Amino acid sequence: MIFNSEFSGQQQHTTQPIVTGGSVIALAYKGGVVVGADTLCSYGSMADFKNVEKIAQVSKNTIYVSSGEFSDFQQVVRELAKIDRSALQYDDGVHPSPRDYGNYLARLSYKRRCKINPLYLQNVIAGFHNGERYLGLVDIYGTYLESNFVTTGFASYFCKAIISNYWNENCTLDQAKQVIRECFKVLFCRDCRAHDVIQLAYVDEQGTHIEQPERVETKWDFSGFKNRANEKLHTQ
Amino acid sequence: MSGSMYDLSVATYSQEGRIYQVEYATKAVENSETVIGVKCKDGVILAGEKQKFSRLLEDNTNKRIYNIDTQTGMAICGKLPDGRNILQRAKAESSQYQDMYAIPASANVLSDRVAQYVHAYTMYSGARPFGSATFIASYNTFDGYELFMIEPSGNKYAYHACTHGKGRAVCKSEFERRSFKDLTCQEALVYIAKMLILAHEEFKEKKYEYEMTWITDNNGRKHQSVPQDLINNAVQQAEQLIEQDQMGE
C-alpha cells in the first residue's frame, strides 16, 4: 500500500515498509491467551534477520507483538514502556490493564493514520487481568477489535479455517499451541515471507511466560523431492 | 543577618558575595520536618517524619518519598509543593533519559539534571528559589548504591548519610557516632527511627507518622516502601532505646 502524502505539503512521510515482520496468531484458551509469531524480519523478499525474538512484554500481564514495519514495532514498544514507567512513578497502586494498552495503541494508530503517516503495523495485544482473558487487534488504520482469536498478515487468509476447525475458546494450552504450530506450518509452505522458527508466549493468572524459539515440523522428504522424479522426466 | 537592600531579589548579590534569597530558601528547609538518607552495608534508606498536624488528617497522606524509577527514589524536605515541582521534573528527566538511552539514568546524571533545574530558579528575579531540598537514592549495576542531596541553591553532593530539616543537628551527631556502613538496612531501621523521634523531642504531644523507603540487596534492589510492620517495630524499639538512654542519664 502506498499512501499519498501530497496533501501533507512539504514533509515527506514513510509510505512503504522496509524491514517487516511476519504473521502473528493469538488464541484464547481456558485460563489464558497464547500468542505465536515467527522469528524472521524480512528485508523485502530477503530473509535478513532470522533470530528476532519479537514478543515484547510490556507489563507483568500483557504482551505485545505486531507484523509490519519492525522499526515501528520497536518504537511502539518504547511508547508502551512509557505507560508502565508512568504508572510506577505515580505509585498509587493502579496498574494499566491489557485493555488500557490496547486502547492506547488504537488511539496512537488512529492519530498517525489521520496524519497520513501511519505506524505500519498490525498489532496484537494479549493479556490476562482480573481473571479475564484479553486479546486485542489494532490495525494500521487504528481499528480496534477485541476477540477470542486474532490473526494478522497472511495468517488472516490461510489460518482462519484451521483455527475454526481445530480450536475452541475453552481448549487447553497445549491444544491451542498445537493449533498455532499447525498454522505456522501452513504459513511456511504458502507465505513467501514466512519462516519455520516460531516463538510462543502465553499469559495466564500467574503472569507472562515467553518461551524459547522452536522450529516447526515440516516435511520435505517427499519421494518426489528425494527421487527427483520430475527432473528425470524432463531430461529424458 | 539582616539583608537590608540586598535581599529583595534573588538576582542580587550582597556586598559580602552572598545571595540572601537562596539563604532564606534554605532557612525554609531548615524549619521543616526532618528527612534522612543513609547508605548502609547492603543498601540505601530514605526516611522522613510527617507530623499529623490535625486529627482530621487521613493516615499515610502527604507522601514525601516517591518513585522516580524502579531503582530510584526521591525524598522531599522542606516545602512539599515546591518539592513536588522538582519531583515532576526529575520524573520527566528520568523518563526522557530512558527513552533516549534505553537504560535508567544513574543517580549522578539524574541529580545533576535536577540540580541544574533547581539552580535555574536562583538566577532570575522573576521567580523564587525552591524552598525544598531533595534526596535522590538509587541503585544501578555500574555505580552500586548512591545517595545525593540537592539544596535550594542548586548544590548537589553525594553522601554516605545526609539529613535536612529541623532535626538535622541531632541526626548529624548520630551519624558521626554510629557507623551505618557496618549495619544492614534491617538493623539500621531502629537507629533511623530513633533519630527521627529525637528530632522532634520538643513537640512531643503531636502525633507523628514515619515514611521510610529502601533499596536493598534483600528486596531485589528496587525502591520500595519499608513494610509497615517493620517501621512500627523499629519505632517501638527506638522508643525503648530512648527511654533506656534517658534512664541511664
Image: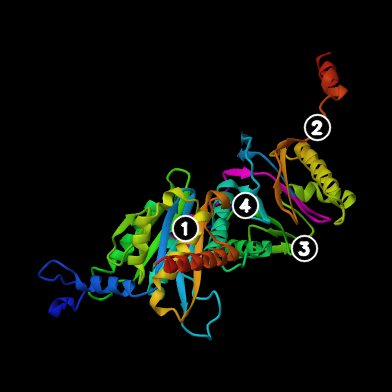
Which class describes the residues within 10 Å of circle 1: few (<14), some (14-19), or many (20+)?
many
On residue A131, the disc is 3
Instruction: Judge whether A71 appears above or below B245 on screen.
Output: above
- Mark 2 residue type: Thr
- Mark 1 residue type: Ile
Q: Which residue is mark 4?
A: A1
Whole-Å distance between the Cαs marked 3 and 1? 36 Å
Q: Mark 3 or mark 4, which is nearer to you?
A: 3
Q: Look at 62% across and 64% down and name the residue there.
A: A95
Whole-Å distance between the Cαs marked 4 and 2? 32 Å
Residues at circles 1 and 2 in contact by the CB criterion of under 8 Å: no
Q: Which residues are magenta?
A: A6-34
Q: Residue under mark 1: which chain is it in?
A: B
- Mark 4 residue type: Met
Whole-Å distance between the Cαs marked 2 and 3? 36 Å
Q: Mark 1 or mark 2, which is nearer to you?
A: 1
Left or right: where does residue B231 sit relative to residue B192?
Answer: right
Same subunit, tags 3 and 1? no
Question: Where residue A99 sits in the image (x, y, percent)?
Answer: 68, 64
Left or right: where does residue A6 sit relative to residue B76?
Answer: right
Q: Earlier in the sequence, mark 3 or mark 4?
A: 4
Question: Where residue B54 sits in the image (x, y, percent)?
Answer: 49, 85
Q: Which residue is mark 2?
A: A218
Q: Mark 4 or mark 1, which is nearer to you?
A: 1
Which residue is the extreme one toward the right? A165
